[in-house]
Each structure stands twice: as structure tokens, then as C-alpha cells.
Amino acid sequence: MIRKLKSGKYRLYSRKKDARTGRRKNLGTFGSLEAAKAHERAVQYFKRH
């Protein structure tokens, strides 16, 4: 899940909520939407390989 921050950057959050905290994990902050999408694809790939 990617959200735009007030600063204009994009933050990647985990798809599922953390069972312990009830919030989504921060998986990184990126300067562009394309960079965030590319990292999300990498995360999904490594979760399965």
C-alpha cells in the first residue's frame, strides 16, 4: 500500500496490519511513486522466492 505524504514523498506500507500493534509496517519512503511501486514489486517477489 502506497500513500503520499504531506512532504510530497511516497511511503510504502505493508499490505496487512501488524497483529501486535494494529498498524501497517513502514517499508520505506521514496521520492517518486515509480520508485515506491518498483520496491513494492521487489518486496512481493522476495516474499515468495
Image (spheres, grey):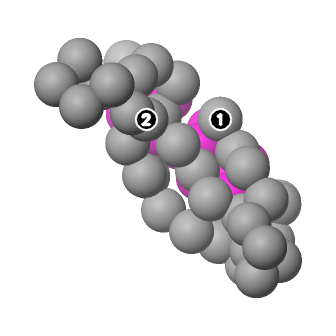
Relative to 9, say whether 40 is above or below.
above
Relative to 22, say whether 33 is above or below.
below
- Under circle 2, the secondary element is strand
Which of disc 2 and disc 1 is earlier in sequence? Answer: 1
Q: Residue at x 58, y 50 (%)?
A: 12
Q: Is residue 13 left or right of residue 21?
A: right
Q: Examine the residues drawn in magenta and state their main secondary structure.
A: helix
Q: Position of residue 1 (x, y in %)?
A: 65, 35
Q: Residue at x 38, y 42 (%)?
A: 25
Q: Which residue is mark 1?
A: 1
Q: Is residue 21 left or right of residue 37?
A: left
Evaluate if marks 1 and 2 touch, with contact meaning CB atoms under 8 Å apart: yes
Q: Could one spot residue 40 in this view of the protein? A: yes
Q: Position of residue 49 (x, y in %)?
A: 33, 23
Q: CA distance from mark 1 to mark 2?
A: 9 Å
Which of the two discs, 1 and 2, sits closer to the camera? 2
10 in magenta: no
| Picture disc at residue 30 | none
**Front-lying residue, 26 or 45:** 26
Q: Residue furthest left?
A: 20
Mark 2: few/some/many CA within 10 Å (<14, 14-19, 20+)? some
**Front-lying residue, 38 or 29:** 29
Q: Residue at x 16, y 25 (%)?
A: 20
Q: Residue at x 78, y 73 (%)?
A: 6
Q: Which residue is mark 2?
A: 24
What stretch of residues is rendered in magenta?
Answer: 36-47
Relative to 48, say whether 46 is above or below.
below
Relative to 8, say whether 47 is above or below.
above
Q: Is residue 43 left or right of residue 4?
A: left
Q: Could one spot residue 45 in this view of the protein? A: no
